[in-house]
Image: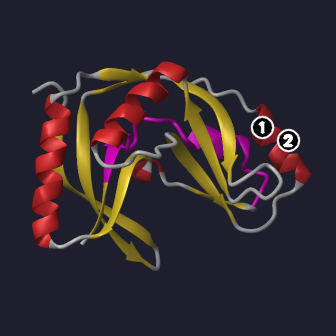
Amino acid sequence: MRAFYAIGLWDLIDVTSIHRQFSWTREVRWVSPSHVHLTLNFLGEITSMQAHSATTILRKTAKTNQPFALEWDRTGVFPSWHRPQVLWVGLKEESQRVVSGISESLGNANSKPHLTIGRLRRQPSANLITQWKDYQILWPSILVTKLLLVKSTLTKQGPIYEVSEECHLGN
């Protein structure tokens, strides 16, 4: 199975407000509200034995971390503003520190916590980049109470996510 560790934000974040703000462009393939999540560590294809081990690691990590708030900071792009391919929203410093620590516990020592909002279909217009750079994120903070192991099945219509394991923080 193809899997990743995540903080599921499905339908908790109003990404449609961004979609509406940028409805004038066809340059972006927006992430569906039902797919919005923070990836903590992408595991790729794993066997059932590796999935069992991943579940054990997830339970241990959740048990040793307390619930915390995700607070939003700014917009950004990957890999660079000159050749953007992905539009993302970043976290404020404290949220980023906590998420990075959890990611490291789950095997991702090089975490760059962000929320992917859209993928660019081609080199975007200067107008899109300027507006994205200046866009103000006004989402409320979100209390994170659980971590997930998610199975991801790729289809022509996009990925299908299925929660394989859900572990509450601090238990």
Corner quadrant of residue 7 = top left
Magenta span contains residue 134: no
Q: Is residue 32 left or right of residue 133?
A: left
Which residue lies most toward the front here? Answer: 109
Amino acid identity at mark 1: Lys
Q: Is residue 163 left or right of residue 19?
A: left
The 10 Å Cα crowd at callout 2, few under 14, some 14 to 19, many 20 or more, is few
Give the position of the C terminus as an image quadrant. Answer: top left
Residue placed most toward the observer, 38 or 17: 38
In percent of width and height, residue 47 lies at 17, 73
Q: How is the image coloured?
A: secondary structure
Image: magenta residue range = 5-26
Identify the residue position indicated by label 2 in the image: 130
Q: Secondary structure at mark 2?
A: helix
* Residue at x-position 18% and y-position 55%: 54
* Residue at x-position 73% and y-position 46%: 22
Magenta span contains residue 16: yes
Q: Is residue 141 left or right of residue 88?
A: left
Corner quadrant of residue 17 = top right
Q: Is residue 108 visible?
A: yes
Q: Secondary structure at mark 1?
A: helix
In percent of width and height, residue 71 lies at 49, 23
Q: Which of the labelled discs sits on residue 124, or is there none?
A: none
122 shown above or below 147 = below
Q: Which of the labelled discs sits on residue 133, or is there none?
A: 1
* Residue at x-position 19% and y-position 29%: 169
In percent of width and height, residue 73 lies at 60, 26
Q: Give the alpha-carbon distance from disc 1 to disc 2, as whole Å.
A: 5 Å
Residue placed most toward the observer, 31 or 112: 112
Q: Is residue 166 visible?
A: no
85 shown above or below 142 = below
Amino acid identity at mark 2: Thr
